[in-house]
Amino acid sequence: MERAPTRLDSMLRKLRELGFRITPQRLAVLKVLAESKGHPGAEEIYTVVRKSFPTTTIATVYKTLAVLKSIGEVLELEFSGDYNRYDGKKPYSHPHLICIKCKRIVDPELASLADMTEKLARESGYKLLTHRLDFYGICPRCQKKDNAD
Ligand code: ZN
Ligand code: MN
C-alpha cells in the first residue's frame, strides 16, 4: 500500500503544478513549515534554513511564504504589534492557544471546537469561508516558572 502523502508532498505537488522552481533553499523552507509543530515566524524559519544553506536570504523565506499563502498551502497568523506566524501543517482556519508570556502557539485538540464551525454555519445560515479563533493565556510551562519565582 502506498503511504499517505505528507504535508511536504502536497506542498511540492502544488508548487510543481504551478511551475514553481524548487531550489534546495526553498525546499528547506517548505520542510521547516511542513514539520514544525510550533508556529514559526519568518525569522525562525530563516535561522533554521541558514544552518544548512548559509547563503539563503530572508527574502527567499518571505517569497516562499507569499507563494504558499497565495495557493492556500500555509496559514498565516497576523498579529498587530507582533510578527506573523505560520502553520504549514494545517493550512486552513483552526483555533489557536497563545501564551502571552513566551509567545508559544499551539493547536488545541478539542473536538467540540471543530464541531462549532459546522453548527454555527447551520444555525446562522452563513456560508462560512474562514475564521479566526485565538485563546490567550499563560501556558503550563510559564505558570510553573511563575510559581518557582
Ligand atoms: Zn508560555
Ligand atoms: Mn495551528
Image (cartoon, grey):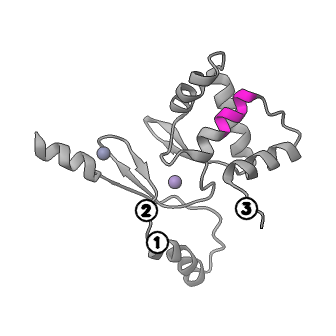
- Residue at mark 1: 113
Q: Which residues are magenta?
A: 24-30
What is the x, y in percent for residue 2?
Answer: 78, 63
- Tell me the chief SS of the magenta region: helix
Give the distance between the C-alpha atoms of the residues marked 1 and 3, in whole angstroms. Answer: 29 Å
Say what amino acid the circle numbered 3 marks: Arg
- The answer to whether 106 is drawn above or below residue 1 in the figure is above
Estimate the spatial distance between the alpha carbons at disc 3 and disc 2, rounded to whole Å.
27 Å
Of all residues, the one furthest to the front in this rendering is 1
Q: Which residue is mark 3?
A: 3
Q: Secondary structure at mark 2?
A: loop
Mark 1 vs mark 3: which is more N-terminal? 3
Task: Indicate the secondary structure of the residue bearing disc 1.
Answer: helix
Q: Amino acid at mark 1?
A: Leu
Residue under label 2: 108
**Which one is in front in this view, the residue at disc 3 or the one at disc 2?**
3
Quadrant for the N terminus, please: bottom right
